Image (cartoon, rainbow, N blue to C red):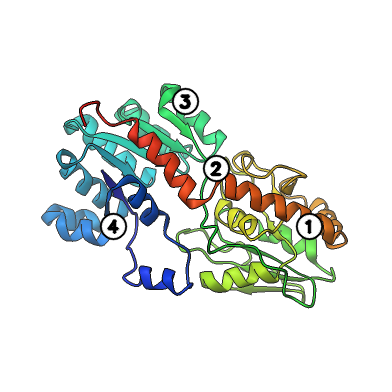
Amino acid sequence: MLLTVSGAIPTTLDDDVASGRRPRADYRVLAEHLDADVVDVPRARNEGGRLGRLLARAGAGPILAWYAWRRRRDYDIILTDGEQVGLPLAFLMRWFGSGRCRHAMIVHVLSVPKKLWLIRLTRIARSIDRYIVYSSEQADVVRGLGVPGERVVLTTFMVDTRFFSPVEPSATRPTICSAGLERRDYPTLVRAVDGLDVDVVIAAASPWSRQRDSSEGVRLPSNVTIERLPLDELRDLYARSRFVVMPLVDVDFQAGITTILEAMAMGRAVVCTRTAGQSDTIDDGATGIYVPPGDADALRATIQHLLAAPDECTTLGAAARSWVVERAELDRYAERLAAVVGAMLPSDS
């Protein structure tokens, strides 16, 4: 089996994990459970031939798809880590041959109009053998393309619960935080906390999102700071915080899921915007609290309520940790995907 990674695997990855500077990489754990070869962008570029080097200029998706298609006869299954690789690979396999190789694609957001147009134009929807989807809304999008239901696998996202594990809040002054960039609604959060007796830290950074920081140009009250933090310091920020806030614009995919699961794994309650795409993870009132999109007053009232109810924060956070360990722990996630992929193997393998 071949697993694609839409980036460059750090040369210091193993040392960083061993030293506690970062969590385990999902692709490394997946590869172990799937007994898979891993190809990242540098490897695909180096081994992709002259055309591969040209395709690398177009981004990670085309070069990884080209590499995977060229190697299709060497593997029973190719697992692509997102539609940026999976769609061009599906096109190549649909129109230029797949051999006996089967294709499983992880789906992050397939509802973008240009992606749907491309899928329909090239007639590749049914040429993908499994769609591994993280949100119910995106699963409906896939089924709406005419994909048989048995090819659509809905699963929770994942988090390394060894790296992100509970500690008692360490700040002497009440502190809450938020983090990430993808479809964040930081202006609403800033309005909600203006003047409250709480320090608010927004770690507005992401290792993969290309979204603009929505806090840029926003007047910050004195109790709000913006920081860019490496993963070990982000973990420390969760540890200092009473709870974590995830303000989102209303989108139809699981924006914010990484931060949500990290916070839940740390035993922190999460106050989250209820969006069309972010509705599968938090159990409202049991592991966190949902608020309406763009409603600063509702968000402010919820923050004030939790600041005044530390025992409720503790109860929500403990339930959140239990939910994550049971359903979203990294090894369990890898085991689920291994079962999905194993069922795709030809009977004579």
Q: Residues within 10 Å of mark 4 (few under 14, many from 20)?
A: some
Identify the secondary structure beneath mark 2.
loop
At which x and y percent is residue 164?
57, 62
Tag nearer the camera, 1 or 4: 1
Residue at the extreme left of the image, as rendered: 50
Tag nearer the camera, 1 or 2: 1
- Determine whether, in the image, residue 40 is placed left or right of residue 228: left
Tag nearer the camera, 2 or 4: 4
- The residue located at (67%, 54%) in the rendering is 247
- The residue located at (20%, 49%) in the rendering is 67
Q: Amino acid at mark 4?
A: Asp
Question: What residue is disc 4 on?
Answer: 40
Contact between marks 1 and 3 (CB within 8 A): the answer is no
Q: Residues within 10 Å of mark 3 (few under 14, many from 20)?
A: some
How many angstroms separate mark 1 from mark 4 (CA)? 41 Å
Res. 270 in view: no
Vertical comparison of 144 with 131: above or below: above
The tag earlier along the polypeptide, 3 or 4, is: 4
How many angstroms separate mark 3 from mark 2 (CA)? 15 Å
Identify the secondary structure beneath mark 4.
loop
How many angstroms separate mark 3 from mark 4 (CA)? 30 Å
Residue 173 is drawn in which quadrant? bottom right
Q: Amino acid at mark 2?
A: Phe
Q: Is residue 91 or residue 30 the one in the foreground?
A: 30
Question: What residue is disc 1 on?
Answer: 313
- The residue located at (77%, 58%) in the rendering is 314
Tag nearer the camera, 1 or 3: 1
